[in-house]
Amino acid sequence: MTIPRTIAIDGPAASGKSTLGERLARRLGYLYFDTGVMYRAVTLKALQTGTDVYDEPRVTRLAEIIVIDVRQASVNDGRMYDVFLDGVDVTWEIRSAPVAANVSVVSTYAGVRKAMTEQQRRIGLQGNVVMVGRDIGTVVLPDADLKIYLDASAEERARRRFVEEQARGIPTSYEDILDNVRTRDKIDSSREVAPLRPAEDAIILNSDHLDADGVLEAAIRLVEAA
């Protein structure tokens, strides 16, 4: 049986794309690449350098000159991969609250997306990859062998993130997380450049009533059917 060599997984924030992508890649022996880390890295760089995230030209210039590298995890601290920004490990820094609050703005910029897309596509075209993001099937890898759009209600996504942050001891509230999820959905789906939407030939997988194992098994069946 021939299985897909390029698999694109798209979907809204906190839908479980990263968990599915990492586990599916491990099951298949493929490279796992969460493209969202690139936009988070650009956002982190802007914050570190005091660059106004609303200054599109300056943020774009940053995106064009920084070096982002994603590697297999080298530290056993719960990470799924290493993320290096200009040679510095920023795997956890890109998950900070300030980055989360600004990444959707940065990711709307055409120049930023162009710079990141070129790097993403180069990696994806090597094959044997599970690539996760918000525009993989529509922009980065429009010819991917298999496209999955992982969806879930805003309420369910907020609940999952709330449970995760509580487990990590992060003080927050469900209502604040739900508001953030809805705001990000609005920004991501209404942006002019590469808006969040399923590719026409994507298979929509709703995970509202599935746990992580159930989502993985459903994805495996899609791989086998493809």
Image (spheres, grey):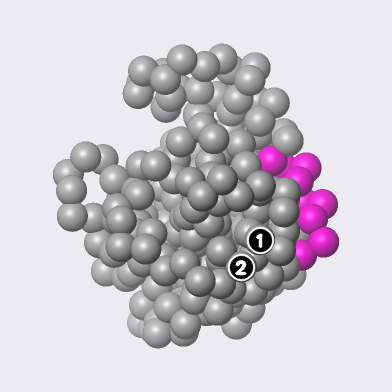
Could you say where residue 165 lies in the image, as x and y percent from the top left?
Answer: 43, 24
Q: Residue at x 40, y 82 (%)?
A: 127
In magenta, the rendered stretch is 184-193
Picture coordinates of residue 145, whole percent (x, y): 53, 79
Residue in the image at 72% along x and 34% along y: 182
Residue 86 visible to the viewer:
yes
Q: Residue at x 82, y 52 (%)?
A: 190
Judged left or right of residue 202, residue 26 is: left
Q: Is residue 42 above or below residue 28?
A: above
Residue 126 belongs to magenta span: no
For residue 153, above or below residue 196: above
Marks 1 and 2: CB-CB under 8 Å?
yes
Callout 2 amino acid: Arg
| Residue 202 percent across, percent down from the top left | 65, 66
220 shown above or below 94: below
**Mark 2, residues whose alpha carbon is within 10 Å: few (<14), some, or many (≥20)?**
few
Q: Position of residue 168 (x, y in %)?
A: 35, 23
Residue positioned 36% across, 42% down in the render: 92
Q: Which mark is residue 82?
A: none
The residue furthest front is 50
Q: Quadrant of the N terminus?
A: bottom left
Give the residue number, with chain letter if any, for mark 2: 61
Q: Nearest the camera: 95 or 31?
A: 95
Label 2 sits on a secondary structure element that is helix
The amino acid type of the residue labelled 1 equals Arg
Dot 1 falls on a residue whose secondary structure is: helix
Give the prevailing secondary structure in the magenta stretch.
helix
- Gap in angstroms between the C-alphas marked 1 and 2: 5 Å
Q: Nearer the viewer, residue 61 or 161?
A: 61
Q: Quadrant of residue 107?
A: bottom right
Question: Can see residue 5?
Answer: no
Q: Which residue is mark 1?
A: 58
